[in-house]
Amino acid sequence: MLHDGERWEREQLMEALECYRHGTSDAPSIRKWSAQAHDGLAVGEMTGPLTFVASTEDEDRHGDIILQGGWKLDGYLKNPVFLWAHHYSQPAIGKAVDVWTEPRRLLAAIRFAPTEFAQQIASLYQGGYQKGVSVGFRPLEFEMRRDAKTGHALGINFISQELLEISAAPVPANQNALRKGLNGAATEGGQFPSWEAPDPDLEGVLEVIRQLNPTNMRGRGCL
C-alpha cells in the first residue's frame, strides 16, 4: 500500500503522463528502483567495473512494467553517468562503460569514480550493505494496464523509453531482480554468496550522505 506522499506523487505522474499524451507538455522524467546485481570483486580491487541489473520486466510495487526491448540508449551513451540517488546537481560517482539488454532486463557495467565518496559507495555494494539501483528515464510510448474483467487500472506498461541516467539507490522497489553470484549465476532470493570482505567506512559514508539533501533521499517509484 502506498503512503500519502507516494500516492500524491503517483497522482502527479498520472496527470503529467496524460498531459504528455495529449501533447500539452513534455514527457516527465520517471525514476524506477530495482534490485541490484553485480559480479563481485574483492574490496580494494576497484579498477574493474561492476555489472548491475539496472531494470527488469517484472511488475513493480506500483503495478508498472517496463518492457526491456523498448530502451533507447543512444542519448545515455553520450553521457553515461552513474549518480547517487538521482542527485542531478551532484558530481557523478561513476560511469557506465557498457550498457546492453538481455531478455527481460537491462544491464550496465559501472566503473566507480576515484573519489572518496564514490569508493565508499562502491564498498557498500562490495560488502553487501547496499544492493539497489535505479533508472531515470523519459517515457516515449506507454499504455495503462487494466484488469481484463473489471477494467480496473493495474498500472502502466512502459513500451518505449529513453534512458537518462542510472543511480545508486539505497531502497529497491523491484523485489524480483536477483543478484548474480561471483560466477555470474543468480543467487536464490537475492542473497549474497558467502565471501568475506572488510567492512567499509560506514560512518564516513553516512557523514557524506548527511551533507546531501536528506529530504530527497527516500525511496521513490517515480517523480
Image (cartoon, grey):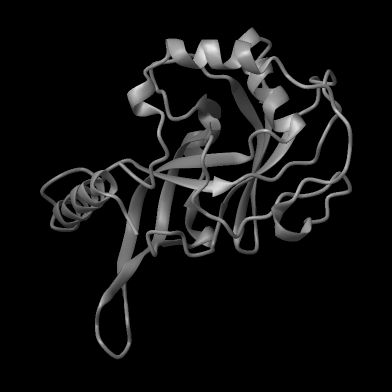
| Front in this rendered view, residue 25 or 42 | 42
Horizontal and vertical percent position of residue 163 = 46, 42
> Quick one: quadrant of the C terminus?
top left
Above or below for 24 versus 205 = below
Rendered location of residue 16, percent (x, y): 19, 49
What is the total number of numbered labels drawn onto the structure image?
0
Q: Which one is in front, 185 or 164? A: 185
x, y percent for residue 222: 35, 45
- Seen from the viewer's position, the closer of residues 35 and 15 is 35
Residue 26 falls in which quadrant of the image?
A: top left
The quarter of the image holding the N terminus is: bottom left
Residue sitting farthest toward the left: 24
220 versus 173 height, above or below: above
State the residue at coordinates (41%, 28%).
217
31 relative position to 146: left or right: right
Along the horizontal axis of the image, is 180 left or right of 15?
right
Residue 89 at x, y percent in the picture: 38, 16
User: In terms of image quadrants, where is residue 147?
Assistant: bottom left
- Residue drawn at (67%, 22%), measured in percent from left and top? 112
Name which quarter of the figure residue 94 lies in: top right
| 189 vs 136: above or below | below
Report the residue at 89% width, 38% height from top.
Answer: 195
Which residue is drawn at the image coordinates 83% and 55% (left, top)?
185
